[in-house]
């Protein structure tokens, strides 16, 4: 009797575990990534005027880079899905594209892990002839790593060098009376929309646009005000001073440096970044199951 009962319990556990596999999907995602922040805003440091429109700037493709990632999905129902993604890309921006004499630029690797909840507007199952396509929306939370860099002329060696900007404290971070150095780890709220397609009995394909609202203003190493050129040399050295204020690199501006506390960026708004592209996922089994589609 005990053996029969134990066998029954084990059978139920195995059947439940096997059934759960039908709800899982794994795949890859590829597309573009672009940055929205102090560089591609309508910003003029001379008048300390800045205007941001994150939606409009999300369609700014000057500095779009390749994004690659891995995707895992769990289907709770034909309408609700939980998704996890690991994304790899580079974000960048350059004042030269916007005619801004501030003349700053950056590029940064970005590594992001996100978890989000997805809602399908229609019932969606892989292989279903009646429910092969649906639009959807999603929102969640992500953590990311960034490390802004630039190529700048080192006045000591007279050579162009690639430097990490965060350790240079280009806005006086870490000094008395200034903010502490910013972290290279951040949080963001991913949200967006897309459309899913069923192909065959195991494959889901989707196209999606996803926005990331971050809680940092330093993806581009630009947020507040200039420190005077003389003080930057005294506090951080000539390399830090050269990276912090680059208007003097422009023709006819060789002797120009911004005054102390002139606006360098706008700390009232945080940086954003956006992902768009295509995702391909596959079910672990051939048994008919729900398909969450994809997002990025």
Image (cartoon, rainbow, N blue to C red):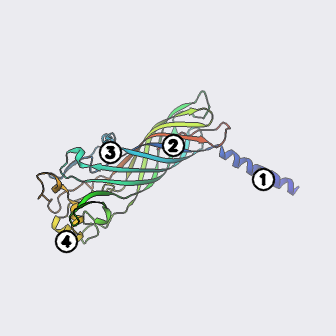
Q: Between marks 1 and 3, how big is the CA–CA gap?
A: 56 Å
Q: How packed is label 4: few (under 14 Cα within 10 Å), some, or many (20 or more)?
A: few
Q: Is residue 269 visible?
A: yes
The image quarter containing residue 184 is bottom left
In the image, is 269 to the left or to the right of 86?
A: left
Q: Is residue 221 visible?
A: no
Q: Between marks 4 and 3, how big is the CA–CA gap?
A: 34 Å
In the image, is 234 to the left or to the right of 217?
A: left
Which residue is identified by label 4?
A: 234
Image disc number at residue 63: 3
Q: How packed is label 3: few (under 14 Cα within 10 Å), some, or many (20 or more)?
A: some
Determine the secondary structure under disc 3. Answer: loop
Determine the secondary structure under disc 4. Answer: helix
Quadrant into which the N terminus falls: bottom right
Which residue is identified by label 2?
A: 118
Q: How packed is label 2: few (under 14 Cα within 10 Å), some, or many (20 or more)?
A: many
Residue at 45% over, 39% down? 208
Which residue is identified by label 1?
A: 10
Q: Nearer the viewer, residue 113 or 270?
A: 113
Q: Nearer the viewer, mark 1 or mark 4?
A: 4
């Amino acid at each position: 009797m005990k053996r029969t009962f134990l066998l029954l319990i084990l059978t139920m556990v195995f059947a439940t575990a096997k059934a759960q596999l039908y709800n899982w999907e794994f795949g890859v995602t590829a597309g573009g990534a672009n940055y929205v922040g102090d560089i591609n805003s309508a910003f003029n440091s001379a008048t300390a005027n800045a205007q941001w429109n994150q939606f409009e700037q999300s369609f700014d493709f000057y500095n779009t880079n390749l994004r690659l990632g891995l995707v895992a999905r769990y289907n709770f129902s034909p309408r609700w899905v939980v998704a996890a993604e690991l994304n790899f890309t580079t974000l960048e921006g350059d004042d030269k594209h916007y005619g801004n004499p501030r003349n700053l630029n950056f590029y940064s690797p970005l590594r992001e892990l996100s978890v989000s909840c997805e809602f399908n507007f229609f019932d969606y199952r892989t292989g279903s002839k009646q429910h092969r396509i649906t639009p959807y929306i999603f929102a969640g939370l992500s953590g990311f790593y960034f490390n802004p860099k630039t190529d700048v002329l080192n006045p000591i060696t007279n050579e162009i060098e690639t430097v990490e900007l965060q350790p240079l404290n280009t806005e006086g971070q870490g000094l008395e009376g200034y903010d502490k150095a910013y972290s290279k780890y951040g949080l963001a709220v991913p949200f967006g929309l897309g459309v899913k397609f069923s192909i065959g009995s195991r494959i889901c394909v989707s196209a999606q646009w996803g926005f990331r609202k971050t809680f940092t203003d330093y993806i581009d190493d630009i947020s507040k005000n200039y420190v005077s050129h003389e003080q930057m040399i005294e506090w951080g050295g000539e390399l830090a001073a050269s990276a912090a204020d680059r208007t003097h690199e422009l023709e006819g501006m060789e002797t120009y440096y911004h005054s102390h506390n002139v606006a360098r960026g706008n700390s009232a708004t945080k940086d954003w970044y956006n992902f768009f592209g295509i995702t391909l996922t596959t079910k672990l089994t051939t048994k008919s199951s729900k398909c969450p589609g994809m997002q990025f």
